[in-house]
């Protein structure tokens, strides 16, 4: 038997497609669910972040993606860690390739640093949205304020993060010059 409303086959005495029942009632198949705080806060970006569809943005920004998304301290500290790991990968490659097992010494600095950079970016692309959502849900659960008050300019956050990184490097260079 076919549904008189949409023409699809009936399952028992109701239509699985449109919700029509043989007694004339209609089951509301589209539930009206109120948007969560997370959906309200993210707005149009909610689907992109949940389904990890902002790969280009995350790849380009890397650890600064967290600064872009209003986690300034996390973005700044991850950027410093990122730079440190890329620098140390060069040292590791030199020490590893100079062992008797390989007994070669070639200048692999740039390819090793590039591979490390790409591996770190791959890590950010895979996990940064999940980490961001977990951090944001905790932040939104703690705040009782209006959702709009939590938003800050994204460009300002990236600029502040870069300024903090430059200040840290200047202090590091100053301390290194004293010793």
Image (cartoon, rainbow, N blue to C red):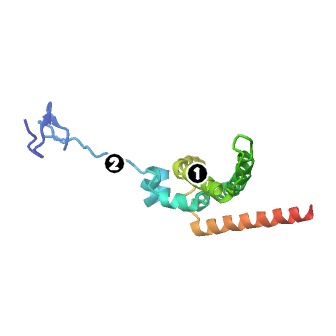
Q: Badge 1, how many Cα within 10 Å: few under 14, some, many 20+?
A: few
**Outermost residue, top side:** 12
Q: Which residue is mark 1?
A: 119
Q: Which residue is mark 2?
A: 32
Which quadrant of the figure has residue 74?
bottom right
Residue 77 appears left or right of 37? right
Above or below, comparing residue 155 to residue 140 in the picture? below
Cα separation between marks 2 and 1 = 42 Å
Residue 152 appears left or right of 98? left
Q: Residue at x 15, y 30 (%)?
A: 12
Which quadrant of the figure has residue 118?
bottom right
Q: Badge 2, how many Cα within 10 Å: few under 14, some, many 20+?
A: few
Q: Residue at x 40, y 49 (%)?
A: 34
Above or below, comparing residue 168 to residue 112 in the picture? below
Dot 2 or dot 1, earlier in sequence: 2
Q: Measuring from the top left, give residue 169's x and y in whole percent.
A: 77, 64
Determine whether the residue tagged by mark 1 lies in a helix, strand or loop. Answer: helix
Residue 79 in sight from this viewpoint: yes
Q: Residue at x 71, y 56 (%)?
A: 87
């Amino acid at each position: 038997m076919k549904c008189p409303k949409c023409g699809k086959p009936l399952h028992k005495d109701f239509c699985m497609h449109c919700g029509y029942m043989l007694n004339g009632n209609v089951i509301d198949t589209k539930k009206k669910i109120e948007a969560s705080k997370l959906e309200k806060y993210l707005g149009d970006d909610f689907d992109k972040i949940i389904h990890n569809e902002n790969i280009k943005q995350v790849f380009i920004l890397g650890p600064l993606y967290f600064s872009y998304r209003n986690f300034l301290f996390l973005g700044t500290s991850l950027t410093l860690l990122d730079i440190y790991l890329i620098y140390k990968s060069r040292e590791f490659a030199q020490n590893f390739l100079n062992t008797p097992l390989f007994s070669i010494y070639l200048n692999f600095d740039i390819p090793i640093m590039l591979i490390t950079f790409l591996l770190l970016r791959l890590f950010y692309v895979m996990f940064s949205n999940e980490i961001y959502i977990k951090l944001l849900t905790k932040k939104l659960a703690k705040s009782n304020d209006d959702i709009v008050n939590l938003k800050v300019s994204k460009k300002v956050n990236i600029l502040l993060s870069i300024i903090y990184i430059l200040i840290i490097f200047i202090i590091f260079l100053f301390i290194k010059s004293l010793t």
